[in-house]
Image: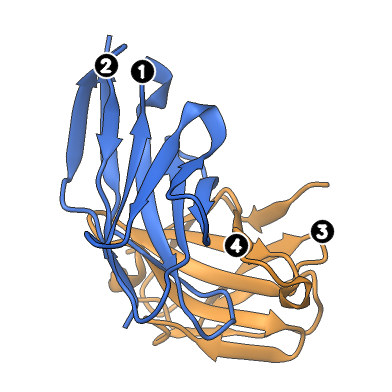
Protein backbone atom coordinates (compact mmCIF):
# COMPACT_ATOMS: atom_id res chain seq x y z
CA UNK A 1 0.00 0.00 0.00
CA UNK A 2 1.15 3.54 -0.66
CA UNK A 3 2.33 5.44 2.39
CA UNK A 4 4.67 8.21 3.45
CA UNK A 5 6.54 8.76 6.68
CA UNK A 6 7.68 12.05 8.14
CA UNK A 7 10.01 10.99 10.92
CA UNK A 8 10.31 14.29 12.77
CA UNK A 9 7.52 16.00 14.67
CA UNK A 10 9.09 19.44 14.69
CA UNK A 11 11.96 21.09 12.89
CA UNK A 12 13.55 24.16 14.42
CA UNK A 13 15.83 26.30 12.31
CA UNK A 14 17.34 29.77 12.65
CA UNK A 15 16.27 32.38 10.14
CA UNK A 16 18.66 32.42 7.20
CA UNK A 17 19.80 28.85 7.72
CA UNK A 18 18.96 25.98 5.35
CA UNK A 19 15.71 24.19 6.03
CA UNK A 20 15.13 20.49 5.40
CA UNK A 21 11.94 18.57 6.06
CA UNK A 22 12.25 14.83 5.63
CA UNK A 23 9.89 12.42 3.91
CA UNK A 24 10.25 8.78 2.96
CA UNK A 25 7.76 6.84 0.92
CA UNK A 26 6.59 3.31 0.27
CA UNK A 27 4.86 2.62 -3.02
CA UNK A 28 4.66 -0.08 -5.63
CA UNK A 29 6.03 1.17 -8.90
CA UNK A 30 6.99 4.74 -9.65
CA UNK A 31 5.69 7.28 -7.14
CA UNK A 32 3.85 10.52 -7.57
CA UNK A 33 4.88 12.69 -4.62
CA UNK A 34 3.67 16.01 -3.29
CA UNK A 35 4.46 18.60 -0.65
CA UNK A 36 1.80 20.82 0.89
CA UNK A 37 2.05 23.60 3.48
CA UNK A 38 -0.56 24.61 6.03
CA UNK A 39 -0.44 28.00 7.74
CA UNK A 40 -2.34 28.44 11.02
CA UNK A 41 -6.11 28.17 10.65
CA UNK A 42 -5.85 27.72 6.89
CA UNK A 43 -6.32 24.94 4.38
CA UNK A 44 -3.43 23.16 2.72
CA UNK A 45 -1.56 24.85 -0.11
CA UNK A 46 0.30 23.00 -2.82
CA UNK A 47 4.07 23.57 -2.91
CA UNK A 48 5.46 21.13 -5.47
CA UNK A 49 5.22 17.67 -6.95
CA UNK A 50 7.40 14.97 -8.46
CA UNK A 51 6.06 12.95 -11.37
CA UNK A 52 9.07 11.94 -13.41
CA UNK A 53 12.27 13.38 -14.84
CA UNK A 54 14.68 15.58 -12.91
CA UNK A 55 15.21 14.51 -9.34
CA UNK A 56 15.30 18.12 -8.13
CA UNK A 57 11.89 19.73 -8.26
CA UNK A 58 11.38 23.45 -7.74
CA UNK A 59 8.19 24.83 -6.28
CA UNK A 60 6.54 27.84 -4.71
CA UNK A 61 8.08 30.30 -2.21
CA UNK A 62 11.65 29.19 -2.97
CA UNK A 63 11.13 25.59 -1.91
CA UNK A 64 12.56 22.60 -3.71
CA UNK A 65 12.53 18.88 -3.13
CA UNK A 66 14.93 16.13 -4.03
CA UNK A 67 13.63 12.77 -5.16
CA UNK A 68 15.96 9.88 -4.30
CA UNK A 69 14.75 6.55 -5.61
CA UNK A 70 17.44 4.43 -3.95
CA UNK A 71 16.64 5.90 -0.53
CA UNK A 72 12.90 6.20 -1.24
CA UNK A 73 13.00 9.77 -0.01
CA UNK A 74 11.53 13.10 -1.09
CA UNK A 75 12.98 15.71 1.26
CA UNK A 76 11.79 19.30 1.11
CA UNK A 77 14.46 21.99 1.19
CA UNK A 78 14.90 25.71 1.26
CA UNK A 79 18.35 27.31 1.14
CA UNK A 80 17.54 30.19 3.49
CA UNK A 81 14.57 29.95 5.84
CA UNK A 82 12.29 32.89 6.64
CA UNK A 83 10.23 33.43 9.78
CA UNK A 84 7.19 33.36 7.51
CA UNK A 85 8.04 29.75 6.58
CA UNK A 86 6.90 28.66 10.04
CA UNK A 87 4.02 26.31 9.28
CA UNK A 88 2.94 22.67 9.11
CA UNK A 89 4.33 20.75 6.15
CA UNK A 90 2.81 17.60 4.72
CA UNK A 91 4.28 15.06 2.35
CA UNK A 92 1.83 12.98 0.28
CA UNK A 93 1.87 10.16 -2.22
CA UNK A 94 -0.76 9.56 -4.86
CA UNK A 95 -2.37 6.18 -5.22
CA UNK A 96 -1.79 4.47 -8.54
CA UNK A 97 -5.36 3.59 -9.41
CA UNK A 98 -5.84 6.81 -11.30
CA UNK A 99 -8.52 8.24 -9.05
CA UNK A 100 -6.22 10.86 -7.54
CA UNK A 101 -6.39 9.61 -3.96
CA UNK A 102 -3.61 10.90 -1.74
CA UNK A 103 -2.04 9.37 1.35
CA UNK A 104 -0.58 12.01 3.68
CA UNK A 105 2.19 11.86 6.21
CA UNK A 106 1.49 13.06 9.74
CA UNK A 107 3.04 16.44 9.09
CA UNK A 108 6.05 18.35 10.36
CA UNK A 109 5.83 21.57 12.31
CA UNK A 110 8.55 23.95 11.15
CA UNK A 111 9.57 26.74 13.49
CA UNK A 112 11.90 29.39 12.11
CA UNK A 113 13.57 31.29 14.91
CA UNK A 114 14.33 34.98 14.29
CA UNK B 1 -12.99 31.92 -9.04
CA UNK B 2 -13.86 31.38 -5.41
CA UNK B 3 -11.99 28.05 -5.46
CA UNK B 4 -13.09 25.52 -2.84
CA UNK B 5 -15.51 26.87 -0.24
CA UNK B 6 -16.67 25.20 2.95
CA UNK B 7 -19.43 26.05 5.37
CA UNK B 8 -19.69 26.41 8.26
CA UNK B 9 -16.26 27.44 9.55
CA UNK B 10 -17.05 26.30 13.08
CA UNK B 11 -19.69 24.01 14.53
CA UNK B 12 -20.47 22.58 17.94
CA UNK B 13 -22.75 19.55 18.16
CA UNK B 14 -24.08 17.39 20.91
CA UNK B 15 -23.59 13.65 20.78
CA UNK B 16 -26.23 12.07 18.58
CA UNK B 17 -27.02 15.14 16.54
CA UNK B 18 -26.70 15.08 12.77
CA UNK B 19 -25.43 17.74 10.43
CA UNK B 20 -24.11 18.37 6.93
CA UNK B 21 -20.81 20.00 6.11
CA UNK B 22 -21.03 21.82 2.82
CA UNK B 23 -18.33 21.89 0.15
CA UNK B 24 -18.49 23.57 -3.23
CA UNK B 25 -16.00 24.31 -5.99
CA UNK B 26 -16.34 26.48 -9.07
CA UNK B 27 -13.41 25.11 -11.08
CA UNK B 28 -15.26 22.29 -12.85
CA UNK B 29 -13.14 19.71 -11.01
CA UNK B 30 -14.22 16.10 -11.33
CA UNK B 31 -12.39 14.79 -8.31
CA UNK B 32 -13.49 15.85 -4.83
CA UNK B 33 -12.65 14.45 -1.45
CA UNK B 34 -13.15 14.89 2.28
CA UNK B 35 -10.37 14.58 4.85
CA UNK B 36 -10.24 14.90 8.58
CA UNK B 37 -7.19 16.33 10.32
CA UNK B 38 -6.28 15.24 13.81
CA UNK B 39 -3.11 16.18 15.72
CA UNK B 40 -0.21 13.85 14.99
CA UNK B 41 -2.20 11.87 12.43
CA UNK B 42 -1.99 14.03 9.35
CA UNK B 43 -4.95 14.02 6.99
CA UNK B 44 -7.07 10.92 6.62
CA UNK B 45 -9.38 10.37 3.68
CA UNK B 46 -13.05 9.91 4.59
CA UNK B 47 -14.81 9.72 1.21
CA UNK B 48 -14.04 10.75 -2.32
CA UNK B 49 -15.77 11.16 -5.65
CA UNK B 50 -14.41 10.92 -9.19
CA UNK B 51 -17.44 12.61 -10.72
CA UNK B 52 -21.12 13.37 -10.33
CA UNK B 53 -23.03 10.31 -9.18
CA UNK B 54 -19.88 8.38 -8.16
CA UNK B 55 -18.58 8.15 -4.61
CA UNK B 56 -16.34 5.77 -2.73
CA UNK B 57 -14.97 5.21 0.74
CA UNK B 58 -11.58 6.27 1.97
CA UNK B 59 -9.66 5.21 5.07
CA UNK B 60 -12.13 6.31 7.74
CA UNK B 61 -15.68 6.32 6.30
CA UNK B 62 -17.63 5.04 9.30
CA UNK B 63 -20.17 7.53 10.63
CA UNK B 64 -20.13 9.65 7.49
CA UNK B 65 -22.18 9.72 4.30
CA UNK B 66 -21.61 11.60 1.06
CA UNK B 67 -23.43 12.21 -2.19
CA UNK B 68 -22.45 13.92 -5.43
CA UNK B 69 -25.47 15.05 -7.37
CA UNK B 70 -23.62 17.86 -9.18
CA UNK B 71 -20.03 18.49 -10.23
CA UNK B 72 -19.86 21.53 -7.96
CA UNK B 73 -21.09 20.20 -4.63
CA UNK B 74 -19.91 17.42 -2.35
CA UNK B 75 -21.62 17.53 1.07
CA UNK B 76 -20.49 15.40 4.01
CA UNK B 77 -23.15 14.16 6.41
CA UNK B 78 -22.59 13.12 9.98
CA UNK B 79 -25.42 10.76 10.79
CA UNK B 80 -25.14 10.66 14.59
CA UNK B 81 -22.26 12.74 15.89
CA UNK B 82 -19.83 11.22 18.36
CA UNK B 83 -17.01 12.88 20.35
CA UNK B 84 -14.52 10.86 18.26
CA UNK B 85 -15.62 12.95 15.28
CA UNK B 86 -14.26 16.12 16.84
CA UNK B 87 -11.78 17.22 14.21
CA UNK B 88 -11.01 19.70 11.46
CA UNK B 89 -12.56 18.70 8.16
CA UNK B 90 -11.14 19.66 4.80
CA UNK B 91 -12.67 19.35 1.39
CA UNK B 92 -10.42 19.18 -1.67
CA UNK B 93 -10.83 19.04 -5.44
CA UNK B 94 -8.63 18.51 -8.46
CA UNK B 95 -8.91 18.94 -12.22
CA UNK B 96 -10.66 16.42 -14.43
CA UNK B 97 -8.87 13.11 -14.63
CA UNK B 98 -9.39 12.93 -18.40
CA UNK B 99 -6.93 15.82 -18.88
CA UNK B 100 -4.17 13.41 -18.00
CA UNK B 101 -1.13 14.39 -16.01
CA UNK B 102 -0.83 14.30 -12.26
CA UNK B 103 -2.73 17.19 -10.76
CA UNK B 104 -2.48 18.65 -7.31
CA UNK B 105 -5.49 19.02 -5.08
CA UNK B 106 -6.98 22.35 -4.06
CA UNK B 107 -8.13 22.58 -0.46
CA UNK B 108 -10.90 24.52 1.20
CA UNK B 109 -10.34 26.53 4.41
CA UNK B 110 -11.74 23.80 6.67
CA UNK B 111 -14.55 23.29 9.17
CA UNK B 112 -13.66 22.94 12.83
CA UNK B 113 -16.16 20.58 14.46
CA UNK B 114 -16.54 19.90 18.16
CA UNK B 115 -18.83 17.16 19.42
CA UNK B 116 -19.71 17.35 23.08
- Quadrant location, the C terminus of chain A: top left
Q: Which residue, given by chain and number where applicable, does mark 2 sit on? A: A17
Residue B108 drawn at (x, y percent) = 61, 53
Camera-near label (2 vs 4) is 2
Task: Read off the chain for label 4.
Answer: B
Chain in orange in the render: B
Look at 36% across and 22% down and name the residue there: A79
Q: CA distance from mark 1 to mark 2?
A: 5 Å
Residue B104 drawn at (x, y percent) = 60, 58
Task: Read off the chain for label 2.
Answer: A
Is disc 1 in the same subunit as disc 2? yes
Q: Residue furthest top?
A: A114
Q: Which residue, given by chain and number where applicable, does mark 4 sit on? A: B92
Image marks 2 and 4: residues in contact by CB distance under 8 Å:
no
Element at badge 1? loop
Look at 46% across and 39% down and name the residue there: A41
Figure colour of chain A: blue
Q: Which residue, given by chain and number where applicable, does mark 1 sit on? A: A80
Task: Read off the chain for label 1.
Answer: A
Element at badge 4? strand
Q: Is residue B87 visible to us here?
A: no
Q: CA distance from mark 4 to mark 1?
A: 30 Å
Image marks 3 and 4: residues in contact by CB distance under 8 Å:
no
Element at badge 2? loop
Amino acid sequence: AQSVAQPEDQVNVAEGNPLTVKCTYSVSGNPYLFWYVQYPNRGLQFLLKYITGDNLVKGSYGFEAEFNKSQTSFHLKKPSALVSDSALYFCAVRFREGNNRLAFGKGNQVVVIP
Amino acid sequence: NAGVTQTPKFQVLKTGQSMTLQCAQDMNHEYMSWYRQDPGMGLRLIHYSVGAGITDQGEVPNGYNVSRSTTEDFPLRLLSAAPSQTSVYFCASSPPLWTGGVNEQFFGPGTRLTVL
